Amino acid sequence: MRDLYADIIVDISHEKLDKTFQYRVPEKLRDTLEVGMCVMIPFGNGNTLRKGYCIAIGETCKFDPTRTKDIAGIAEKGVSVEDQMIALAAFIRRNFGGTMIQALKTVLPAKQSVRQLEHKRIERLLDKEATISLQGECERKHQVAKGRLLRALVEQPEIPYEWVTGKLGVASSTVKSLERAGALRVVSTTGYRNPVKLAQEEEQRFPLSREQQKIVTNICQEFDAGKIGTYLIYGITGSGKTEVYMQLISEMIERGRQAIVLIPEIALTYQTLLRFYKRFGDRVSVMNSTLSPGEKYDQCERAKNGEIDVIIGPRSALFTPFPKLGLIVMDEEHEGSYKSESTPKYHARETALEVARIHGASVVLGSATPSLEAYYRARLGEYRIFSLKERLTGGTLPKVHTVDLRAELKEGNRSIFSRKLQELLADRLAKGQQSMLFLNRRGYAGFISCRACGHVMKCPHCDVSLSEHRGGKLICHYCGYEEPKPERCPSCGSKYIMGFKAGTQQIEEKLKELFPAVRTLRMDGDTTRTKDSYEQILSAFSNGEADVLIGTQMIVKGHDFPNVTLVGVLAADLSLGANDYRSGERTFQLLTQAVGRAGRGKLPGEAVIQTYQPEHYAVTHAAGQDYEGFYEEEILYRELSGYPPAAHMLAVQIYGKYEDGAKQLAKKLSDVVKSIEDDGTGDDRVSVIGPAPATIGKINDIFRFVFYVKHREYGRLVHTKDVLEEELQRSQPKWESVQFDFDPMNTM
């Protein structure tokens, strides 16, 4: 029997994760040691027993086997927060691919070289008369800086250190001199950086409806009985799901437990945080990519020390190291942004279930348009489903007008805006009500092509067209390549080279041509680059500083503006043309969410859906706000085609510097999958689609290929991934890399 060796991490701070030590697995541990376990190892020249974490097990010894030490044993201990994080990393690595180090870097808070925030102040030690006397003595000796500081201390016995060195212009050496003389002392206190900078206001609370209270009571009763469940709250837009979340969190806090609230977009943080802060004060904090390293680290420390009860943020907030987690809320659970696009490509929903299992916590999923995966599992009884069918304000869902753009064009209307939308916009402007215009595109214009010969301006590094931006620039949205817009076609010399597609900027300009006095705000990828830009735009619109908010997907997700009574959806069916099995689901969700932004206050709302495919089931069911009708049609298509959630799918993505090498590796790996021996035939065998070039075959000079593996059991695909990882370990490709994406949200 060959020896087994384990890679052990001794220090789990982020910057030291790549530093591993190898130990032999003794005979007594061969059958019990697993990746992720905490072990005791003899470390250093003195063989001091230290705690470490096993991140890999294999038969290859990287060092001299005769000098390799044995693992002393598996640590016997209470489970710490760090242990739980290691176990979670092992789960992510096993179920989503990538290396253990990549998984650890995903879940562990980065131990940056960041000092705690230090607050220093200077306190006077002498009484007032003695200080005045010393001040006079210093001034007689022309010690001007000392005299200035002492004069300030006469007036105020305690002064912030930064004010002394800044406003007073007193050097730190002068402060130290007076400190040595016994005239003052410097007092230093440390504190945490708090990214929440909101004035606490008293929340206006509304009593829960009977349906809302029923949800809270049921979940709490099951939690108290030790039944840890997963719950899907399917509630129409405006039905008060957030009120349920907050009451559940209050109940958990009373039980001494903490809560994580996941939201899909950073854009939602401001409004969500405001509501929670009014309820829970400074016991709530936020975690997202706009925080500085110091702020992120401090929030993890505050959570670990029990100084906060609630953390709000996108999927990375799931890894907040709470010691007593009781509840995970995943709002708008259908959103694609809950799936990581970088290795390991984990999904927050599946990972949240594992976090909850580790902590003994409940999981609440909420959406007006649940993902097919969540609704499918609820139908199977894996999740318990609750419904909220009425708007909290007592209002009704908006009246929806579906406009056929083909008919508009035939009748001579070439405008971006249908006649119905123009009519309703004019009405809202006259009444002083607000409107939202949604477009799922960005930039000033789309691809640039020649109308004489058909030549399209493309990125020389990526297999995609360049997009026109203001200032005469053509930009690649994948790698950032830029070049000036040509005056004439580089292929045929024609002057008829121009852009297509209306972007958010162009919509804004056309709107102002129609209504010169209209006040607009625009929210898209170009206007939200800075740290506070989301908050500033949403706050300005909420305060009535604009009549119309124009934007991309981020404006239709979760925001609540009571004065918005009209939503216009421009080019509603663009997403239906995507080469993706989820395109119908995405379109339905997007349209339903967009329509749901209107009429959330006391005033009734209307929505206009402009489309070239008014008969498509995703459009008709969205207009009718009929989720069940859409689900029945969509799940039938998924079952017939063998797509998630009826079956599972693994995308094996191959990236290479050279096209032939990447193509050959894709063929080799797909052949390995096809040759995997199993006990069954037919339905029990995995199905392989491809390989083929990716939809975008080259990005940033890297060639991309993909093949898909399908099977109804997720575990079979995990086994397939394991086999391919072993093959890659043996062959060690030099110029290629491989990534695994389970149940991909986007086809590559």
Image (tube, rainbow, N blue to C red):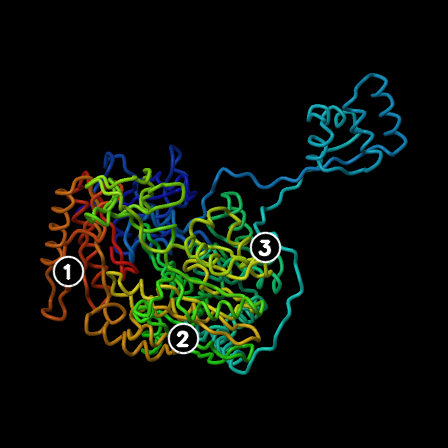
Instruction: Assign a secondary structure to mark 2.
Output: strand
- In front: mark 2 or mark 1? 2
Kind of residue at badge 3: Glu
Q: Residues within 10 Å of mark 1 (few under 14, many from 20)?
A: few
- In front: mark 1 or mark 3? 1
Kind of residue at badge 1: Ile
Disc number at residue 307? 3
Which residue has dot 2 on it?
Answer: 401
The residue lying at 44 percent from left, 51 percent from top is 82
Residue 175 placement (x, y as % from top left): 73, 27
Q: Residues within 10 Å of mark 3 (few under 14, many from 20)?
A: some
Mark 1 to mark 3 CA distance (whole Å):
51 Å
Residue 682 placement (x, y as % from top left): 10, 70
Q: Is residue 273 left or right of residue 227?
A: right
Mark 2 to mark 1 CA distance (whole Å):
41 Å
In this view, 489 is above or below 617: above
Please tell me which of labels 2 and 1 falls first in the chain. Answer: 2
Residue 220 placement (x, y as % from top left): 51, 75
Mark 3 to mark 2 CA distance (whole Å):
50 Å
**Is residue 635 in view?**
yes
Q: Residues within 10 Å of mark 2 (few under 14, many from 20)?
A: some
Please tell me which of labels 3 and 2 falls first in the chain. Answer: 3
In which quadrant of the rendered view does residue 735 lie? Answer: top left
